[in-house]
Image: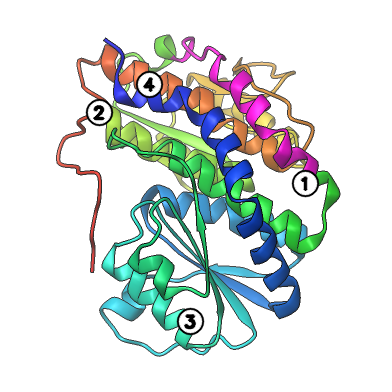
């Protein structure tokens, strides 16, 4: 029987197309507001999968708009009550439910502190949308499975669409418009050759660099959520600073490379790790020791990175079931987490 998670993975291309069609006015309006405001810096507010989407957007904004972007801990507002001075800045708050109290509290604090605040949420109206000066409906549709998939992808699609509008980046605009078709191709990719390499492992690393590090972070979380498997995400550069000591025959590594300036270094790291006797695989051509994983080349480095998560979602759902687990019902988790 097909799981809810598998159905929702298959719906990702349709959800992305729906977002771009239904939220076009909100995307354009938010982009114009950012052009008028011309923020010197931005901050992000999120937790869990939404924070991994925020990490992707932090890289995308710095690479495209040249603005520094920092993540703020929600406890600054919800626990510590620290007043924030964000005049001249902008804030992006991301939450599927739009009602986690700590995310809402920090979004309210950012708005009160002078930031142009933007809510990306799958629930309108919601406390988060009310806390921000601009709100965008992710249009992901209902997510029944506990593990976020559609809303993660659509959070990034929305952020990239707003970024393209803000900066007037025509190449990014075209790449975002083409995403639904590329995501449909990505859904069909088969990563089942990971199964043999992961068999018997209790822990693994997922590596990436730049925007692909955000994809690696999301992948590591999904291994924990749906498979009860310990996984950690690292920069392919940072992993050499200590963590690589754990790598060996029983400690596999998945390296996620996009078609960008970091591709060669990520591929080289995967080869080096494979040379240490570990199972290593990489989403790149030309690896000498690491196994290859299929990928979709979208023609733009940012959308290339985003497309990597879709075949991974398909694999991890299948891997969860192969371990006798139900990916729709992760142990100790619930759909909406309301932290304070």
Q: Position of residue 39 (x, y in %)?
A: 68, 77
Quarter containing the N terminus: top left
Is 192 in the magenta? yes
Q: Where does the magenta region start and end?
A: 174-194
Q: Earlier in the sequence, mark 1 or mark 4?
A: 4
- Residue position marked by numbered label 2 in the rendering: 328
Task: Give me the residue at 56% from left, 81% from top.
Answer: 115
Helix, strand or loop at label 3? It is helix
Q: Earlier in the sequence, mark 4 or mark 3?
A: 4
Task: Give me the residue at 21% from left, 33% from top.
Answer: 330
The residues tagged by marks 4 and 3 sit, at their Cα atoms, a distance apart of 38 Å
Is residue 196 toward the left or the right of residue 184 in the image? left
Quarter containing the C terminus: bottom left
Helix, strand or loop at label 2? It is loop
Colouring rule applied to residues: rainbow
Q: Position of residue 36 (x, y in %)?
A: 74, 77
Q: Earlier in the sequence, mark 3 or mark 1?
A: 3
Prevailing secondary structure of the magenta residues = helix
Residue 169 visible in the picture: yes
């Amino acid at each position: 029987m097909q799981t809810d998670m598998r159905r929702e993975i298959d719906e990702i291309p349709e959800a992305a197309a729906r977002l771009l069609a239904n939220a076009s006015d909100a995307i354009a309006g938010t982009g114009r507001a950012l052009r008028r405001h011309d923020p010197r810096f931005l901050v992000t507010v999120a937790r869990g999968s939404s924070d991994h989407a925020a990490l992707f957007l932090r890289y995308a904004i710095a690479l495209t708009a040249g603005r520094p972007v920092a993540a703020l801990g929600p406890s600054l507002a919800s626990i510590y009550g620290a007043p924030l001075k964000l005049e001249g800045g902008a804030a992006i708050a991301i939450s599927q439910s739009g009602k986690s109290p700590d995310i809402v509290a920090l979004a309210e604090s950012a708005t009160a502190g002078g930031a142009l605040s933007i809510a990306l949420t799958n629930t309108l109206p919601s406390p988060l949308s009310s806390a921000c000066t601009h709100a965008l409906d992710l249009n992901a549709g209902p997510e029944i499975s506990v593990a976020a998939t559609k809303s993660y992808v659509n959070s990034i699609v929305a952020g990239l669409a707003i970024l393209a509008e803000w900066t007037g980046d025509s190449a990014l605009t075209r790449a975002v418009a083409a995403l639904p078709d590329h995501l449909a191709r990505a859904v069909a990719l088969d990563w089942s050759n990971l199964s043999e390499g992961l068999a018997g492992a209790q822990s693994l690393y997922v590596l990436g660099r730049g925007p692909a590090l955000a994809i690696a972070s999301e992948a590591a979380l999904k291994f924990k959520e749906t498979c009860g498997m310990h996984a950690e995400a690292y920069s392919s550069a940072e992993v050499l600073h200590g963590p690589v000591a754990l790598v060996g025959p029983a400690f596999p590594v998945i390296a996620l490379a996009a078609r960008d300036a970091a591709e060669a270094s990520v591929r080289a790291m995967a080869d080096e790790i494979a040379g240490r006797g570990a199972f290593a695989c990489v989403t790149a051509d030309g690896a000498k020791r690491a196994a290859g994983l299929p990928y979709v080349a979208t023609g733009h480095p940012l959308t290339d990175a985003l497309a990597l998560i879709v075949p991974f979602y398909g694999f991890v759902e299948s891997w969860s079931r192969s371990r006798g687990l139900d990916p729709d019902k992760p142990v100790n988790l619930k759909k909406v987490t309301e932290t304070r």
